[in-house]
Image: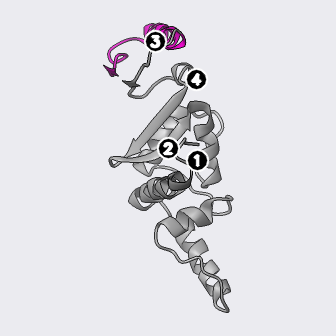
Amino acid sequence: MLDEPTSGLDSTTALHLVTLLRDLARGGRAILTTIHQPSSRLYRQLDQVMLLAEGHIMYYGDALRAVDWFDHLGFSLPYGTNLADHILDCAMGEVTHDPSAPGAAQAAASCGVSTHSDEQEDARASRRHQYVEKMRGPVAVRALYTTYESWYLGHPGGF
């Protein structure tokens, strides 16, 4: 277990250290570490990640599939942006949300917006769309981790 072993290192040295840790893991050792603001090259070396926001898990699973999870919920990775930076922006609520994404309604429901269907569904859908469209800051952060927490109950292996 290593607590921020790359802190204070330049990006090349940090990458060499993570490559060494990866080689140790391939040799059968369990490696658990915290990495603060990894470069994109370093992030691509990670196998599994657990991403936290406000002390809650907002994603756990394959490191390279994190982008798929956030995209599904409407927090797409902007072109040319470092995935690790985007994840940090998501954790801080500093992201642009796309309410038309497949999982946007799921994210809205996780914040307490009803998704039941009846004769008033059109009005509810309109309110839900307006609510999701405005999701920023703390509301967006809560949506990310509450959506993941409810999804994880049925998928304990992660995404």
Closer to the chain start, of discs 3 and 1, is 3
Q: CA distance from mark 1 to mark 2?
A: 9 Å
- Asked whether residue 123 is drawn in magenta, I would say no
- Quadrant of res 138: bottom left
Residue drawn at point x = 44 percent, y = 39 percent: 51
Q: Amino acid at mark 2?
A: Tyr
Which of these two is toward me, 101 or 150? 150
Q: CA distance from mark 4 to mark 3?
A: 13 Å
Q: Which quadrant does the N terminus fall into? A: top left
List the residue tagged with mark 4.
Answer: 44
- Asked whether residue 12 is drawn in magenta, I would say yes
At numbered mark 1, what does the secondary structure look like: helix, strand or loop? helix
List the residue tagged with mark 2.
Answer: 59
List the residue tagged with mark 3.
Answer: 21
Residue drawn at point x = 40 percent, y = 23 percent: 32
Pointer 1 with pointer 2, Cβ within 8 A: yes
Pointer 2 with pointer 4, Cβ within 8 A: no
Q: Amino acid at mark 3?
A: Leu
Alpha-carbon neighbours of circle 4 within 10 Å: few (<14), some, or many (≥20)?
A: few
Which of these two is toward me, 146 or 83? 146
Nearest-to-viewer mark from 2 and 4:
2
Estimate the x, y position of residue 64 in percent, counting from the top left: 61, 32
Q: Amino acid at mark 1?
A: Phe
Alpha-carbon neighbours of circle 2 within 10 Å: few (<14), some, or many (≥20)?
A: many
At numbered mark 3, what does the secondary structure look like: helix, strand or loop? helix
Estimate the x, y position of residue 16 in percent, counting from the top left: 48, 7
Which portion, as a residue range, is magenta?
1-26
Q: CA distance from mark 3 to mark 1?
A: 27 Å
